[in-house]
Image (spheres, rainbow, N blue to C red):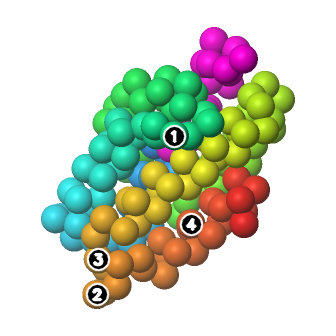
Amino acid sequence: MTTTQFDFANEEWELIASAPVIVGYAVARAEDSGFMGSLRETRTLVASIAAGAEDNPARSLIDGATTTEVRELMKEYGSSAPEYLADTAVEVCTRLVPVLGDTATTEESVGYRRWVLEVARSVAEAAREHRVRVSEPEADLLARVADALDLS
């Protein structure tokens, strides 16, 4: 049986669906990429989430999460400091692991967590900062997120 968004309480689903947006946006804001770089990172975030994941065991959950209003959630955090966003992203990931683990299959849980991390990596690689593809603050945040998602 496939786990869907309807297997979770509303608060749990809100956490699951918002995780890729919050994590991706935190990565985008971890280092200033300039106007064009920020635009690329934002477009990559939206596109990565909208694309979903065809062969992922958590496809049903990912498909549900792709309906999240990415731009609205980004507006909510728009004026937040990068450090606050980073800490929030890590905290969301820490909370996400047991929520998925309690309801989804192990394969779905791992698949969804990997997808969240892949969305974040795509954002980090979307624009160069200081002539590098993934800046040190982005790499540090990706490592913290991987740890919080129990994927390191």
**Can see residue 65?**
yes
Tag 4 residue = 142
Q: Nearer the viewer, residue 97 or 107?
A: 107
Given the image, on which type of amino acid does mark 2 rest? Arg
Given the image, on which type of amino acid does mark 3 rest? Arg
Tell me: residue 83, above or below residue 42. below
| N-term-proximal mark, 1 vs 4 | 1
Which quadrant does the C terminus fall into? bottom right
The mark lying in front, picked from 1 and 4, is 1
Q: Residues within 10 Å of mark 1 (few under 14, many from 20)?
A: few
In this picture, residue 109 sits left or right of residue 73? right
* Numbered label attached to residue 128: 3
| N-term-proximal mark, 3 vs 4 | 3
**Can see residue 85?**
no
Q: In terms of secondary structure, where does tag 4 sit?
A: helix
Tag 2 residue = 131
- The Cα–Cα distance between marks 1 and 3, rounded to whole angstroms, is 29 Å
Determine the residue located farthest toward the bottom in the rendered image.
131
- The Cα–Cα distance between marks 4 and 2, rounded to whole angstroms, is 19 Å
Tell me: residue 127, above or below residue 47. below
Given the image, on which type of amino acid does mark 4 rest? Leu
- The Cα–Cα distance between marks 3 and 4, rounded to whole angstroms, is 16 Å
- Residue 81: image quadrant is bottom left
Q: Residues within 10 Å of mark 4 (few under 14, many from 20)?
A: many
Dominant secondary structure (helix, strand or loop) of the stretch shown in magenta = helix
Which quadrant does the N terminus fall into? top right
The residue located at (46%, 37%) in the rendering is 54
Given the image, on which type of amino acid does mark 1 rest? Asp
The residue located at (63%, 69%) in the rendering is 143
Q: Which residues are magenta?
A: 1-20
Tag 1 residue = 55
